[in-house]
Amino acid sequence: MLDETDTRLLAALQRDAQLTSQDLGALLGLSPSQAGRRRQRLETCGLIRSYTARLDPAGLGLAIQAFVQVEMTTHGPEEAQSFTQLLSTRAEVVSAWTLTGNADYLLRVYCADLPALNRLIHDVLLPHRAVAKVQSQIVMDQCKADAPLPL
């Protein structure tokens, strides 16, 4: 069970994961040791999965962001495992979801340029034995940044 203090702690860490126990204590009206113990409990129970840095894709030369929908020819467990294994080997695929509806998978990808996106689609995804169709949408602008979870 989360209390209001836990919720405020989680919200603060979503905004800035580098907050120290001292910072958290000051924000929450707790001692640094109390804030640190709360954070540790939330980490241990799995509510805080990890801490990461958000990098600038354009600054890293990743000029193309796209969403790629993949339809499968078959939905057997062996084919699904093989396809998800393929996805796990591709750095360009930063996230993947299984879906209801026409597409079976939705991939979020970052590539250096359009030829790199084309190679990913035509040389990696389409040759997979269970892939029937691939459709991509290139992101023109992201009008809302990836946001924290609602608490």
Image: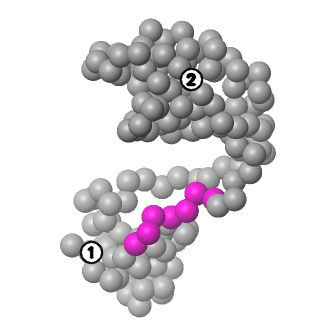
Q: Which residues are magenta?
A: 145-151
Q: Which residue is mark 2?
A: 134
Determine the image quadrant of residue 77. top left
- Residue 13 location in percent, x, y? 48, 69
Give the left or right position of residue 78, taking residue 8 as reference.
left
Q: Residue at x 69, y 53 (%)?
A: 142
Quadrant where the N terminus lies? bottom left
Q: Determine if residue 42 is in view.
A: yes
Looking at this view, name the residue that lies furthest to the front: 102
- Residue 123 location in percent, x, y? 62, 12
Give the left or right position of residue 133, taking residue 72 as reference.
right
Looking at this view, name the residue that lies furthest to the bottom: 29
Residue 107, compared with residue 120, is above or below; it is below
Q: Secondary structure at mark 2?
A: strand
Q: Residue at x 42, y 86 (%)?
A: 28
Residue type at the position of mark 2: Val
Q: Main secondary structure of the magenta part?
A: loop
Q: Is residue 120 magenta?
A: no
Residue 70, compared with residue 19, is above or below; it is above
As measured in the structure, the alpha-carbon distance from the residue carrying label 2 to the one carrying label 1 is: 42 Å
Q: Which residue is mark 1?
A: 2
Return the mark for residue 77.
none
Way the structure is coloured:
one colour
Residue type at the position of mark 1: Leu
Quadrant where the C terminus lies? bottom left
- Residue 14 location in percent, x, y? 49, 66
- Closer to the camera: disc 2 or disc 1? 2
Q: Determine if residue 105 is in view.
A: no
Rate crowding at label 1 as few (under 14), some (14 to 19) or many (20 or more) other CA atoms within 10 Å.
Answer: few
- Observer-nearest of 70 and 45: 70
Q: Residue at x 37, y 59 (%)?
A: 48
